[in-house]
Amino acid sequence: LLLLCYTEEEAVIVTDLKNTDVFVGESATFTCEVSHPGVKNVQWWLDGSPLHNNFVTEISEQDGTVHTLTLKDVACHDSGTVTFRAGSLISSAKLLVKGIFLLA
């Protein structure tokens, strides 16, 4: 008699978030890929504040493994640390929003 024991492998982060620099008014996109679908409690944060889907924040998922955050029409005060959390998985990156200076 052969008994096969299968334990579901713990998900890991395959692709970490990357630091992103954008200008005021542009969009900033962050992508994090996990090893397999089904990770629970996915959350995005900006400087410790939770983010939710709305007219300036787009949170999406593709194939259950690619998680994307897009911050639209960013302002200087949006600069900070973006964090992706899914259970015990955590990835963070810096967002730098640069102002545009016009010389007369």
Image (cartoon, grey):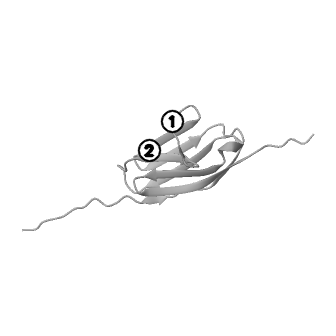
**Number of the label disc, if any, that sits on residue 53:** 1
Q: Quadrant of residue 61?
A: top left
The residue most toward the left is 1
Image position of 5 with respect to 92: above or below: below
Q: Is residue 12 left or right of residue 49?
A: left
Q: Is residue 8 left or right of residue 95?
A: left
Question: Which amino acid type is marked by label 2?
Answer: Gln
- Which of the two discs, 1 and 2, sits closer to the camera? 1
The residue most toward the front is 48
Q: Is residue 49 left or right of residue 26?
A: left
Is residue 17 visible to us here? no
- Measure the alpha-carbon separation of dots 1 and 2: 16 Å
Q: Work out which quarter of the rendered image holds the C terminus and state it.
A: top right
Q: Quadrant of residue 102?
A: top right
The residue most toward the bottom is 1
Q: Residue 1, image x and y in percent? A: 6, 68
* Residue drawn at (66%, 40%) of the image: 74
Question: Which amino acid type is marked by label 1?
Answer: Asn
* Residue drawn at (52%, 58%) of the image: 16
Q: Residue 48, image x and y in percent? A: 55, 49
- Which badge, 1 or 2, is on the more N-terminal residue? 1
Q: Secondary structure at mark 2?
A: strand
**Number of the label disc, if any, that sits on residue 13:** none
- Binning the other alpha carbons within 10 Å of mark 1 as few (below 14), some (14 to 19) or many (20 upward) gives few
| Residue denoted by label 2 | 62
* Residue drawn at (50%, 51%) of the image: 84
